Amino acid sequence: MKTYIALFRGINVGGKHILPMPALVAIFESLGFGDVKTYIQSGNAVFRSHAENVGLLASRIVAEINKGHGFEPQILLLELAELEQAVRANPFPDAEIQPNTLHLNFLLSASANPDLVALAAIQKNSERFSLINRVFYLHAPKGSAARNWRPRPKSVSVWR
């Protein structure tokens, strides 16, 4: 069995696309997944499955949510090894002493022409960022909650 991390975008935000975590766990278990764990009300989940095709796996999850809850959330599935590799590739290891200041954003696919110059133009002096393949790393030691400049569209954030 493989361990997968399911990252959802737009679940339980602003009173829209409400999906209680017990219901999400039940959906995952009904699909035959094991060891299902969720994180707060984010919709992020970790589970185990024998499935090898990530695209098919994501489609099954979205279809089941739509069937029971009437919406199709955007989902990004990572294998545990992908998450571990992203952590190892962190270009800001000194930021790990304050992990709440280091953000990893996983894009659905690598950007062919990222406009890093535009991002650099709006970054604060205290911030650092790097795009490595489909992972956007942001070190924001003075916070980033008031900012909404993470890569869009089609990104899902993971906070360490």
Image (cartoon, rainbow, N blue to C red):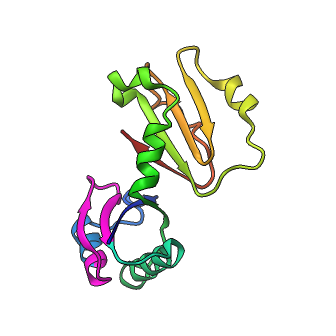
Q: Name the residue at 24% across, 67% down.
A: 36
- In the rendering, at what x and y percent does residue 34 appear? 24, 73
Q: Nearer the viewer, residue 90 or 62?
A: 90
- In the rendering, at what x and y percent does residue 39 appear? 27, 54
Quarter of the rendering containing residue 24: bottom left
Q: Is residue 14 visible?
A: no
Query: What segment is highlighted magenta in the picture?
Result: 27-48
Q: Quadrant of the N terminus?
A: bottom left
Give the number of callouts: 0
- In the rendering, at what x and y percent does residue 66 appear? 44, 80
Q: Is residue 55 visible?
A: yes
Is 105 inside the magenta-drawn segment?
no
Q: Name the residue at 62% across, 23% down.
A: 123
Q: Name the residue at 36% across, 83% down.
A: 68
Q: Name the residue at 26% across, 59% down.
A: 38
- In the rendering, at what x and y percent does residue 33 appear? 29, 76
50, above or below 83, in the image: below
Is 30 inside the magenta-drawn segment?
yes
67, above or below 26, in the image: below
Quarter of the rendering containing residue 6: bottom left
71, above or below 89, in the image: below
